Image (cartoon, rainbow, N blue to C red):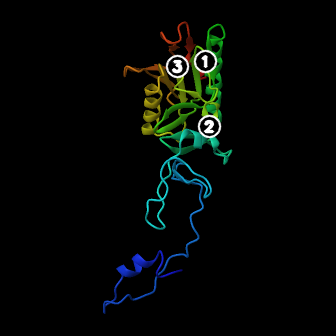
Amino acid sequence: MVQNGTGRRAWASIRGLEGEPPLSIGGKTGTGDNRRYQYAAGGAATGARPPRDAHCAGRGRDGVRGRNVTTLLSVADYAELAEHDERYVTELVRGVVVREPRPRHRHGQIQVEIAFQLRAWAGTRDASVTVESGYILSDDPATVRGPDVAVVLGSRSSDGQPGGWLRGAPDLAVEILSPSDTSTAVHQKTLQYLEAGARLVWIVDPDARTVTIYRPDGSANLVRAHEVLTGEDVLPGLSVDLSDVMQ
């Protein structure tokens, strides 16, 4: 412990009756912060720091000795990350790596059923269906999302793109809520899809047994488990009985 190190401020703030510090106080000897990522409660990363021999776009030291600030990653930085934890899935949100626990069994069942229904529809059309594939929604701020299920209309190539991800949002993005999701995070994710070009966003709530449909014009509506979910004019001819999905 060092009185003149990290414990200096606390030591200077304590005074005895004679005006002198009544005790010695200190902080740990500095060994440096070697964490590659910084995570908050709930699994959200509050920042990412590049290795000492690497360079990442964004901020590094702020000029004050010993004080680190958040380093924002670019899409290319994120694509090159070699550190993976199989317990979590990650996305890049506004330059920060955000991780979430792997989905539960119920989540996976609904995901597979929706993907099956969409794949059956896409089979005779010029469309593709993906599951958890990355989409580059923005370069500044750098954002890469991986919707639970997505539909892309027409032919789009990911050749030459970081991570082999498609640039821009899918035409339909489907997100299935998990217990770790907050309303603010879901709202942010929905807006990011729409702003990047998505024509429909489905937010599936397994507990409420509902799907909320969001559109670029700001309109939205709720479909319940006993009702039919359609592709509207984006996926014409698609009709999904939600009772089959939510069973």
What amino acid type should be assigned to the residue bearing mark 3? Asp
- Per the image, the residue denoted by label 2 is 103
The answer to whether 154 appears left or right of 82 in the picture is left
Which of discs 3 and 1 lies nearer the camera? The answer is 3
Which of discs 1 and 2 lies nearer the camera? The answer is 2
The answer to whether 133 appears left or right of 141 in the picture is right
Contact check, label 2 and label 3, Cβ < 8 Å: no
| Badge 2 density bin: few <14, some 14–19, many ≥20, Cα 10 Å | some
What amino acid type should be assigned to the residue bearing mark 2? Pro
Q: CA distance from mark 3 to mark 1?
A: 23 Å
Quadrant for residue 150, please give it: top right
Contact check, label 1 and label 2, Cβ < 8 Å: no
User: Where residue 223 appears, x then y in whole percent?
Assistant: 47, 19
SS for dot 3: loop
| Image mark for residue 244 | 1
Image quarter where the N terminus lies is bottom right
What amino acid type should be assigned to the residue bearing mark 1? Asp
Tell me the residue at 65%/12% (across/down): 120
SS for dot 1: helix
User: Where residue 191 appears, x then y in whole percent?
Assistant: 43, 30
Which numbered disc flags the more N-terminal residue, 1 or 2? Answer: 2
Which of discs 2 and 3 lies nearer the camera? The answer is 3
**Vertical placement of 61 versus 79: above or below?**
below
- Per the image, the residue denoted by label 3 is 171
**Vertical placement of 81 versus 233: above or below?**
below
> In this orientation, which residue lies closer to the viewer: 48 or 40?
48
Quadrant for residue 116, please give it: top right
**Vertical placement of 81 versus 35: above or below?**
above
Tell me the residue at 52%/16% (across/down): 226
| Image mark for residue 141 | none
The answer, for residue 42, to whether it is visible in the render is yes
Contact check, label 3 and label 1, Cβ < 8 Å: no
